[in-house]
Amino acid sequence: MSEKPVSIYFGETLGRYGFGDGHPFGPDRIQAFWQETVKQGLNKKVLVATPQICDEQALMAFHTQEYIERVKSQSHSGTGYLDGGDTPAFQGVYEAACTVTGSVLDGMHHILTGQHPKVFVPIAGLHHARRDSAAGFCVFNDAGVLIENLRNRHGIHRIAYVDIDAHHGDGVFYAFESDPELIFADIHEDGRYLYPGTGAIEETGKGQARGTKLNVPLPPYANDSDFHRVWPSVEDFIRQGKPELIILQAGADSIQGDPITHMAFTPAAHEYAARQLSKLANEFCNGRFIALGGGGYNRTNIALGWNAVVKAMLGEK
């Protein structure tokens, strides 16, 4: 095992996933994160991993062939939208999105081989993408691809997906709504006030999967006190599921001051979530834990929130 127990994927190719012309999801987000990583000296305590690009076969574990071909086509032309108007195509968007997913899959490989059991991928956690469509700034659903590849290629079935992004992780939830082996827990702003309008408390899974999904909608301006009030239910839920690997989508748009959401967490909430999930990963999963940056459109919040996650994964106070 590496002497550095956490790896961070960082590099120019990963930063290419972002949209220009003042779009909230700009390509500068990764630099905002990394400058703070260096400022805090965390870059010296982690293994800095090179972003990787995945192949089409890996994507097909989750996405339809027809949709993948559409992204390729619009990536070549660089025109139009990949959804109803939130996710514009740009030249090279296919390769950029494949680098997000490829880095997550490469992180999974290093986790499973024991080289470094905990991984953070800042530009990842594109949780709105559906099997057959983009949605909400998300082209390929790297978490969904990860889950399917863990099962198909590695025989790992009981996976816990925890999401603290302000937006409900609908692309993951509905793709696995009837899957009893995906343990899904999501704290988010109430869908009556925020895109995508889903994730009601009554949505607990379908059929055999009923009761394996936990949605915790919070009102606008919910703060750290509200987070700590509901977090124990998430932790208990994961513990009951006895997962083999834990995924955290650590969207920083639930931190106060985000320009497109109304939540009021501080980075301390993200640090606590990552710390507790690290402990659960050590208890149930041989330490296997991957965190994905997710959303976040206030650059200071991205820098502080994601680095709080990294510190927690390193076991630092």
Image: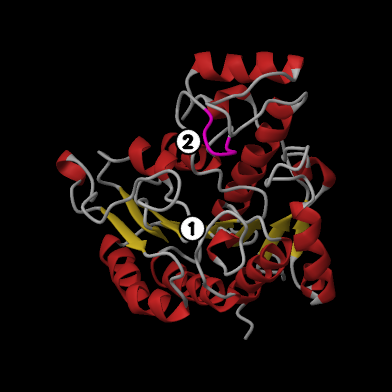
Give the labeled residue for mark 2: 153
Q: Badge 2: few (under 14), some or many (20 or more) residues near its Cα, within 10 Å?
A: few
In the drawing, does residue 54 fall left or right of residue 20? left
Taking the spot 76% from the left edge, 54% from the top edge, the residue there is 30
Residue for badge 1: 166
Label 1: how many residues lie within 10 Å, few (<14), some (14-19) or many (20+)? many
- The residue drawn where x is 66% and y is 19% is 80
Residue 271 on image: x %, y %: 56, 75
Measured from the top left, where is residue 232 in percent x and y? 33, 76
Start and end of the magenta stretch? 134-138
Q: Magenta: predominant secondary structure element? A: loop
On the image, the x and y values in percent for residue 218 come to 37, 64
In the picture, residue 19 is in which quadrant?
A: top right
Which numbered mark, 1 or 2, is in the foreground of this view? Answer: 1
On the question of residue 185 being in view, the answer is yes
Q: Identify which amino acid the numbered label 1 is placed on.
A: Ala
Tag 1's secondary structure?
A: loop
